Image: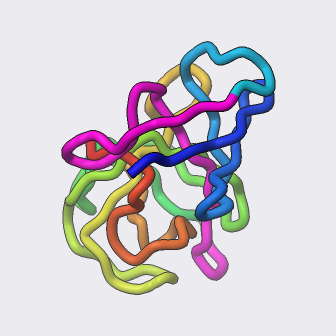
């Protein structure tokens, strides 16, 4: 299965899901990028980050140092904020605004990973693992 994206500068949109992507590797402006799924999830060869919305129903969501509620809170991000996710992993099962799940999203900034947020507070469009993101 081939997944094609039209890239314009550093942003791309999935032609299948409509999700917005930030392309982490250098790609010429307006280039066509095709990627095949890798084993374990994600797509290759270009590393892809996806942008989603925090959806807590009100309060800010905690970004933790690992995918467990017992891990320290690194920062918080307000409801409605756009966040960039570069991978997902299985962690502690928690209940949030979007249901109950053991999936955690790794939130990244321009200078690298920040920490993990429960997928139950990030509107990825999927229950469980997102098919376009690799596993951490």
Please indicate whether residue 122 sits to the left or right of residue 82 in the image: left
70 left or right, relative to 75: left
Task: Look at 57% across and 44% down and name the residue there.
Answer: 4
The figure's colour scheme reads rainbow
Residue 82 part of the magenta segment: no
Of 50 and 93, nearer the camera is: 50
- State the quadrant of the C terminus: top left
Provide residue 34's location: percent of width, then percent of height. 53, 35
Image spot of residue 35 (x, y percent): 46, 36
Q: Nearer the viewer, residue 20 or 29?
A: 29
Q: Magenta stretch: residue 35 in it?
A: yes
Q: Residue furthest front?
A: 1
Name the residue rendered at 79%, 20% in the picture: 29
Q: Is residue 43 above or below residue 19?
A: above
Residue 66 can be seen, yes or no:
yes
The residue drawn where x is 39% and y is 32% is: 44
Q: 87 or 14: which is nearer to us?
A: 14
Region of the chain picked out in magenta, as a range: 32-59
Work out whether 26 lies above or below 51: above
Q: Nearer the viewer, residue 60 or 131?
A: 131
Residue at the image point whose x is 34% and y is 51% from the top: 88
> In this rendering, is residue 22 above or below 99?
above
**Residue 115 visible in the current orientation:** no
* Image spot of residue 23 (x, y percent): 60, 29
């Amino acid at each position: 299965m081939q997944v094609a994206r039209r890239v314009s500068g550093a942003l791309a949109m999935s032609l299948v899901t409509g999700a917005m992507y930030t392309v982490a590797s250098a790609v010429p402006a307006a280039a066509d990028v095709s990627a095949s799924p890798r084993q374990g999830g994600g797509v290759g060869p270009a590393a892809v980050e996806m942008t989603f919305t925090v959806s807590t129903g009100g309060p800010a969501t905690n970004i933790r140092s690992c995918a467990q509620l017992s891990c320290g809170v690194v920062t918080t991000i307000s409801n409605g904020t756009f966040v960039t996710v570069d991978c997902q992993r299985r962690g502690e099962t928690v209940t949030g605004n979007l249901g109950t799940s053991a999936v955690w999203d790794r939130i990244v900034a321009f200078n690298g990973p920040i920490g993990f947020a429960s997928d139950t507070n990030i509107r990825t469009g999927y229950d469980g693992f997102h098919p376009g993101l690799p596993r951490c």
